Amino acid sequence: MRILFLGAPGAGKGTQCKRLAAKLNLPHLSSGDLLREAVKAGTPAGVSAKEFMDKGVLVPDEVLIKMFGEKLGSPACKGGYILDGFPRNLAQAKSLDELLGSLNSNLSTVINLEVDDSLLTERICGRWTCSNKACAAVYHVKFAPPKAEGKCDVCGSDLSQRADDKEELVKARLNTYREQTEPLIDYYTQKKVLVTIQGEGDQDVIFNNILQSLKVTA
């Protein structure tokens, strides 16, 4: 299976992608993780990306596509993969289509997690993450609080909040999603590969609905 997850910030893409990757034994590919991996490995795309990252500017689409090409064309992805956080706009989606075409491949399913904006804001603003990058456990002050305030249950490290998880910045992130990424819903609907899943409620129920949409036994 070659799966792409869509959804606004806070929709739960990362959580469901990780569960699905473990269930199907497929690589979970997020753009951020791939960037760090490519830079660390010193791949051609990683070297190019590092030049932009060192300057504190966004990595251009052509470099991102080159990086995904290195990964998607590798033996690790021969049996399928799960894309998370890329593409983010129509230009990237069309470039991804060209890349997949060059690999004689295509996306089999695009899963859109649909969540109301008010809940998205509540989810994001209450989210805290373990500061230990080797752990990176995620908590929420309302939905999944740590046993000890400000401390990770797993490793005991301090919890921290992303700078852009503050309410005023969350609204800007959601506006950017609506303007740039939401048009991909229509794009993949026209390609007849999009499935919309209700992203509100119990995480196990959401996951089982995803499995049903993929015709995978729970």
Image (tube, helix red, strand yellow):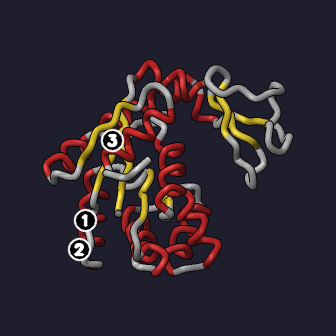
**Which residue, as the protein is rendered here, is positioned at the far left?**
190
Give residue 181's position: percent from left, percent from top: 32, 43
Q: For mark 3, does the 10 Å Cα neighbourhood hold few (<14), some (14 to 19), or many (20 or more) residues?
A: many
Give residue 81's position: percent from left, percent from top: 42, 64
Which is nearer the eye, 122 or 163? 122
Mark 3 or mark 1, earlier in chain:
1
Which is nearer the eye, 62 or 217? 217
Measured in 3D between alpha carbons, the distance from the residue under mark 3 to the one under mark 2, in whole angstroms, is: 23 Å
Q: Is residue 159 above or below residue 77?
A: above
Residue where numbered disc 2 is placed: 101
Q: Residue at x 37, y 37 (%)?
A: 113
Contact check, label 3 and label 2, Cβ < 8 Å: no
Q: Secondary structure at mark 1?
A: helix
Q: Is residue 30 visible?
A: no
Q: Image quadrant of residue 197?
A: top left
Label at residue 97: 1
Label at residue 112: 3
Mark 3 or mark 2, earlier in chain:
2
Query: Please, what is the three-letter code of the amino acid marked with disc 2?
Result: Gly
Contact check, label 2 and label 1, Cβ < 8 Å: yes
Q: Residue at x 51, y 80 (%)?
A: 44
Q: Given this view, does label 3 or label 1 mark the residue nearer the observer?
A: 3
Q: Is residue 128 above or below residue 35?
A: above
Q: Is residue 162 above or below residue 111?
A: above
Measured in 3D between alpha carbons, the distance from the residue under mark 3 to the one under mark 1, in whole angstroms, is: 18 Å
Q: Residue at x 56, y 76 (%)?
A: 47
Q: Given this view, does label 3 or label 2 mark the residue nearer the observer?
A: 3
Q: Quadrant of the N terminus?
A: bottom left
